[in-house]
Amino acid sequence: MPYNHKLALLLFASFALLGTPALTNADNNTHQNKASNDSKSHAPDHHKHWSYGGEDGPEHWGSLEASYAQCATGAQQSPVDLISARSAPLAPIQINWAPFVPSVVNNGHTIQVNVEHQSQMVLDGKTFTLLQFHFHHNSEHTVDGKHYPLEVHFVHKADDGTLGVLGVFFKEGEANPALQSIWDIAPLEKDTIVASHDFDATDLLPAERGYYRYQGSLTTPPCSEIVDWAVFSHPIEASKAQINAFAQLYANNYRPAQPINRRYILRSE
């Protein structure tokens, strides 16, 4: 069975359990092709294997190898619980993303969408270029200790090497057409599928753009503390079937919330 239909079939099964018709495209196979030699998904990984559970799970990342030490010793780790945020006159985030042809990757930890380098975000006057976005179930950030069922992270990079990551929560609700277009071609096993149609990532952003802001880290090894985080406070919706389809691939691919320590969490007014 071609990989490009597998996540769609998970969606079909999820909808069947709900007694609701599937939302998949019947001739989806005509809109995509494999990128079997894509270097982003098949590059050799010489680092120690890590996972989200067991002996190589989050509580052990810092001891798996020397380059992961900051996962255990860092003072500005992510994710965090977005509680006790201080209201502040934060400038609106400028999002200048162009439609692109997505490369959808199953990398063994999540579903990731690689982006052509033509989209930017301006955060606190600093320009970052969008590299990729990926998904977590449950959400990595929490609000007053509570998880959302899904969170997407839009990873951007500045010229100085620092990262700007924009987070968006999903709550259960109506089916999300933009998310569906990614799910329709997401491979179930490690692989990359390249679509032949444009995707507009702004369709995965909330209409209301209030956000939380703090300094943090990567949420996976090596947990480098080089990230300017912005997380929208208003979630968007995804259907129960869409959430379940991802959960069947990655049931708990989130790092637990880390200590705030001496940091402040700000929230736009």
Image (cartoon, grey):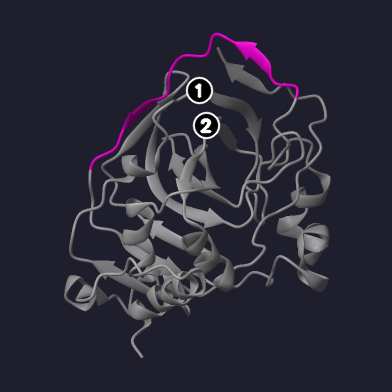
Res. 234 mark: 2
Instruction: Indicate the position of residue 103 as horizontal and vertical percent values.
Output: 32, 63
Residue at the (69%, 42%) spot, across then down:
78
* 160 displayed left or right of 3: right
Q: Are marks 2 and 1 in contact (CB under 8 Å)?
A: yes
Q: Looking at the picture, which amino acid does disc 1 mark?
A: Gly
Residue at the (42%, 74%) spot, across then down:
7
Q: Is residue 51 above or below residue 80?
A: below
Residue 210 appears in the figure:
yes
Instruction: Indicate the position of residue 10 as horizontal and vertical percent values.
Output: 46, 76
Specify which label sits upstream in the sequence, 2 or 1: 1
Instruction: Indicate the position of residue 151 as horizontal and vertical percent values.
Output: 55, 48
* 72 displayed left or right of 68: right
* 207 displayed left or right of 233: left
Region in magenta: 84-98
Instruction: Indicate the position of residue 81 as horizontal and vertical percent values.
Output: 73, 36
Which residue, given by chain and number where applicable, does mark 1 sit on?
210
Q: CA distance from mark 2 to mark 1?
A: 7 Å
